[in-house]
Image: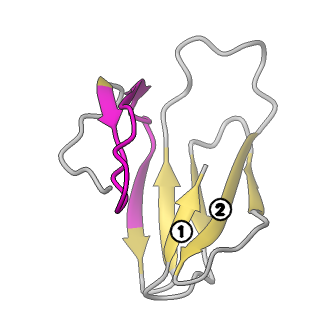
Amino acid sequence: VDVSNAIYGTGYDITLSSISATTYSSPVSRTVTTNVTTGERVGSAGILLSWNTPPNPNGRILSYVIKYKEVCPWMQTAYTRARAKPDSLEVLLTNLNPGTTYEIK
């Protein structure tokens, strides 16, 4: 499911159920908090990601690691990694395939 108009840093309660031809599953509930990361498209093959410093880091931040992989039209099994220095709050991902959906962590 795609959700739009979510507010960054806000917690939401999500309840999911699945329906097949023969059965209806019990609902599963989770509470999720939206990320404080934003992305801005750069051309047809890039995205500029930016974020805020975590409010309560667990120690000194040495670097930020960004992992991404294609999920549609083909599901990649391995993530590509990019690093950002601790004083940088953005990273530019390039060489992405136009018209492809990515999972970015």
Label 2 close to label 1 by CB (< 8 Å): yes
Which residue is more in the foreground, 63 or 73? 73
Residue shown at 77%/13% (left/top)?
59
| Residue placed furthest toward the front | 22
Q: Which residue is mark 2?
A: 68
Image quadrant of residue 67? bottom right
Left or right: residue 83 compared with residue 87: right
Q: Which residue is mark 1?
A: 102
Residue shown at 70%/73% (left/top)?
76
Q: Can residue 24 be found in the magenta stretch?
A: yes
Which residue is more in the foreground, 78 or 62? 78
Q: Residues within 10 Å of mark 2 (few under 14, many from 20)?
A: some
- As measured in the structure, the alpha-carbon distance from the residue carrying label 2 to the one carrying label 1 is 7 Å
Magenta region: which residues?
Answer: 13-40
The tag on residue 61 is none
Callout 2 amino acid: Tyr
Helix, strand or loop at disc 1?
Answer: strand
Q: Earlier in the sequence, mark 2 or mark 1?
A: 2
Q: Quick check: 73 above or below 86?
A: below
Left or right: residue 54 compared with residue 68: left
Q: Can residue 38 be found in the magenta stretch?
A: yes
Q: Position of residue 32 (x, y in %)?
A: 41, 28
Q: Quick check: 5 above or below 40?
A: above
Image quadrant of residue 41? bottom left
Image quadrant of residue 25? top left
